[in-house]
Image (cartoon, grey):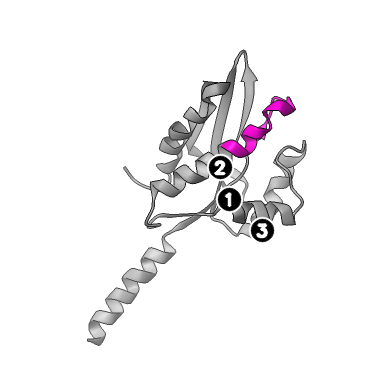
């Protein structure tokens, strides 16, 4: 009986420790028009929900809830709409203790949003150069159509096809 307990324990431990803890932060509005600030959080919210559906059993990734991220941002007094958010967002990662961060930016070019999303390594603040979702062009009324594109490109960093 004891010889079966050890392998089961090892399998259980490997599954727990192989999870990558991910924080999805609000996106930055590079356009400067405050009318678009709502999308900073809408994109974050939609991405969080979509990534939770990618690995429902949490075999590979553990996505932090919106409440966990919001509480940490509140504790640090951070606001995604503030001009210094890009520089200050790294401070919240000390509270969240995550393995990876997903964040990004958007700006307006012509009549379209250009959305860029990246995976960052918190300890170095450097983005993953292989898995990025860049130059996604969407009209304002279709901005959330970018979410499946972002998830498809970024999830490959965590879950093999």
- Residue 75 quadrant: bottom right
Of all residues, the one furthest to the bottom in this rendering is 2
Look at mark 2 in the image and give the residue it sits on.
45
Of 126 and 45, which appears nearest the observer?
45
Of all residues, the one furthest to the top in this rendering is 110
Look at mark 1 in the image and give the residue it sits on.
66
Whole-number angstrom distance, CA of label 1 to CA of label 2? 7 Å
Please state the horizontal and vertical placement of residue 54, each as a whole percent of the image: 39, 46
Helix or strand or loop: what does disc 2 sit on?
helix
Whole-number angstrom distance, CA of label 1 to CA of label 3? 16 Å
Task: State which tag comes first along the sequence, 2 or 3.
Answer: 2
Q: Is residue 28 a member of the stretch shown in magenta?
A: yes
Task: State which tag comes first along the sequence, 1 or 3.
Answer: 1
Helix or strand or loop: what does disc 1 sit on?
helix
Look at mark 3 in the image and give the residue it sits on.
94
Drawn side of residue 9 relative to residue 109, left or right: left
Of 146 and 94, which appears nearest the observer?
146
Please state the horizontal and vertical placement of residue 102, each as a whole percent of the image: 55, 43
Residue drawn at x 52%, y 28% as measured from the top left: 134
Q: Is residue 41 a member of the stretch shown in magenta?
A: yes
Of all residues, the one furthest to the front in this rendering is 141
Task: State which tag comes first along the sequence, 1 or 2.
Answer: 2
């Amino acid at each position: 009986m004891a010889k079966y307990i050890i392998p089961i324990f090892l399998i259980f431990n490997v599954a727990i420790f192989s999870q990558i803890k991910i924080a999805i932060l609000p996106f930055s509005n590079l356009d400067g028009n405050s009318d678009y600030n709502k999308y900073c959080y809408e994109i974050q919210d939609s991405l969080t929900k979509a990534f939770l559906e990618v690995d429902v059993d949490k075999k590979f990734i553990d996505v932090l809830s919106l409440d966990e991220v919001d509480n940490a941002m509140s504790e640090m007094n951070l606001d995604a709409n503030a001009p210094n958010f890009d520089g200050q967002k790294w401070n919240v990662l000390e509270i969240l203790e995550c393995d990876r961060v997903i964040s990004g930016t958007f700006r307006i070019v012509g009549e379209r949003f250009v959305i860029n999303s990246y995976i960052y390594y918190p300890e170095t603040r450097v983005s993953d150069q292989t898995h990025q979702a860049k130059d996604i062009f969407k009209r304002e009324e279709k901005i959330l159509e970018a979410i499946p594109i972002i998830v498809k490109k970024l999830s490959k960093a965590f879950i093999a096809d």
